Image (cartoon, rainbow, N blue to C red):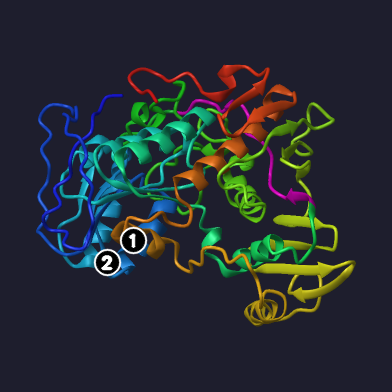
Amino acid sequence: MLWGMQTPSLSRRRFLQSTAVASAPFILPSGILSAEVKPNDKIAVGFIGMGKQNGGLMNRFMGAKESICVAVSDCDTNRRNAARDRANGRQKNKDCKAYEDFREIIARKDIDAFCIATPDHWHAIQTIAALESGKDVYCEKPLTHNVHESVEVMKAVKNNKRVLQTGSMQRSSRGFRVACELVRNGVIGEVKRTAVNIGGPGRPCDLKTEKEEPGLDWNMWIGPGPMRGYSSVLSPRGVHGHFPNWRNYKEYGGGMVCDWGAHMIDIIQWGLDKDNSGPVATIPAKDSKASKGAQLVYEGGIHMMHGAGLGSSFYGTDGRVECHRGRLGLWLGDKHVAGNQGGKKVNLNQELDRIEAEYLKDAKVKLYDSNNHIGDFLQAMKTRKKPITNEIVGARTSIACHLLNQTYYNQTAIAWDPKKNTFAKGGDPKWLTRNYRGQWKV
């Protein structure tokens, strides 16, 4: 990489328990100096990638009493300046600074954590750089662009003794937690199969080249990805109110398999207690041109069908659980007994109260209870304990998504060893990584 590790300045953060990080130079373009921020008792957060997603995340961090936004970075002039002005306006100061190159804010010693919401092909590079500089990280989902990056991010968190939260925030929703507790406590019996109803895999980028506009560093947007002509589909100019479609293309994202899979497959892994492992095999779709129908296989012969069910669905010997955002259903046998999915229209919170009172009263398995994903990360920074979607959760969910994609890309079954994070047999090592352009490496 282009960077080493750097010990952050922690004298002003009285409540953060820090661990030592080896010191080494951080290589930056000449002439760049760290900006100064007045000492305070708040967690100083820098934001990388100022599109729609980080706009919302920045508001949440600024809304928390523990944190303050001190820096933003984006390769688009309008986006970064708008984010800076929004932060300074809300915080009623001029402490937030804007940068074009993310390495500039990672070099600042007065920042405690970074919130990364760039396109997927940048996630691991920026996350590892931040971790090696001694910062904690909140990185959007999917945590990585490929399997190799997932492994390296887990190593970087461990080696640098940092805290990482992945943006798979469904785990901080009561409905999904209750759904997984029903499964984990055997309410539906022995789980035989599961399903996720999400969109298809990534596809090769075939967009037409458009004329570049001033104010965007297109070379930096492409970064480690393959160079191609500018497209407003990938990076709409300036401040925009939609989620750009770079996520549909395998060079920069992973299609809906990674985008929504990082939510729904994540819940499957939570319900199956596979946070520390993952699938052991994949099965391709019967139709080589299909965008659904491939499967992940977990230990014990539990299959996860892609493109079926509700959002995340579990099917057991005694019933089933279906869950989505704002929707949960519990069936015992063929009878719908609780929830607002598949039965009468009822208040979900009231149904969750009833489910916990009737079906989980004596539950032996109680899952991590978080009702605020950002707050959970900030609290973990103070305690130095792992947050709800830590690097292991995020990386292993990403690996499951990447394996499903590779099954579509190569139309073949995969035998996988989740302990070693490599093929159990066969498989092409190239499927686990990508070709990095120029100076960028993981």
SS of the residue under disc 2: loop
Q: Is residue 88 visible?
A: yes
Residue receiving disc 1: 378
Q: Is residue 365 left or right of residue 60?
A: right
> Are the residues at dot 1 and dot 2 in contact (C-beta closer than 8 Å)?
yes
Residue 258's x, y, as percent? 59, 41
Amino acid under disc 2: Glu
Amino acid under disc 1: Leu
Q: How many residues crowd around disc 1 within 10 Å: few (fewer than 14), some, or many (20 or more)?
A: many
Q: How far, Cα to Cα, is label 1 from label 2?
A: 7 Å
Residue 26's x, y, as percent? 19, 30
Residue 294's x, y, as percent? 76, 36
Residue receiving disc 2: 66
Query: Which residue is nearer to you in this view: 426 or 311?
Result: 426
Query: Which residue is nearer to you in this view: 316 or 323?
Result: 316
Please identify the dominant SS of the magenta region. Answer: loop
- Mark sitting earlier along the chain (1/2): 2
Q: Quadrant of residue 396 in the image? A: top right
> What stretch of residues is rendered in magenta?
192-210
What quarter of the picture does the N terminus occupy? top left
Q: Is residue 232 left or right of residue 292?
A: left
What quarter of the picture does the C terminus occupy? top left
304 above or below 387? Answer: above
Q: Is residue 324 visible?
A: no
SS of the residue under disc 1: helix
Residue 87's x, y, as percent? 26, 60
93 above or below 257? Answer: below
Q: Is residue 20 magenta?
A: no
412 above or below 38? Answer: above
